[in-house]
Image (cartoon, rainbow, N blue to C red):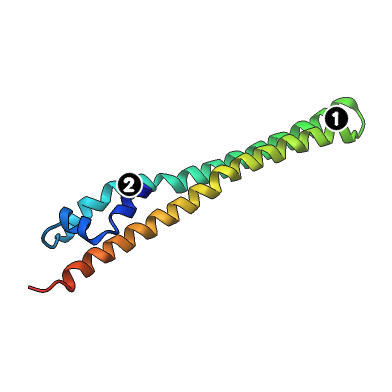
Amino acid sequence: MFFGLRKLEDKDFRFQLFPKEPTEAEQELFFSPLERTIRWLPTIASLSMLLGLLGTVIGINSAFGAMEAQGKVSLEVLAGGIKDALNTTIAGLLVAIPSLYFHRFAENKIRYISELMVKDFSTKGP
């Protein structure tokens, strides 16, 4: 996707795709599959953050449950549960951050290419 968007920045390539000015409907049809594809990225980011949070809660809950079962406060048991909790948080963020970044990047790139296409035909002479 990245390389396809990058290729669209080339004016000659855009003129090969659209030798005459595209209508709004043609432009919509052209960009619609790209926009549909990148719409999944924020969903993936949100779900991964929520799953990371869920893992955090489960890890801390299991640590306190284990301490309750032992009947005493134990740093080793607490540390193990917190470690698990932090690992799930890290995993969630490692998925969420790049997903949000690439969504914003692709969204801006599509908007930029759309603007370039408008410029192509507004500055093109007869």
Q: In the drawing, does residue 120 fall left or right of residue 90?
A: left
Disc number placed over residue 4 in the picture, else none: none
For the C terminus, the image quarter is bottom left
Report the mark closest to the observer, 1 or 2: 2
What residue lies at 91% left-to-right and 34% top-to-bottom?
73
Where residue 97 appears, x then y in whole percent? 55, 49
Q: Secondary structure at mark 2?
A: helix
Task: Measure the C-alpha gap from mark 1 to mark 2.
Answer: 49 Å
Above or below, 32 against 118 in this view is above
Which residue type does callout 2 highlight? Answer: Arg
| Tally of numbered discs | 2
Q: In the drawing, does residue 55 fall left or right of residue 100?
A: right
> Which of 3/76 is in front?
3
Q: Secondary structure at mark 1?
A: helix
> Which of 59/38 is in front?
38
What residue lies at 26% left-to-right and 50% top-to-bottom?
32
What residue lies at 17% left-to-right and 53% top-to-bottom?
17
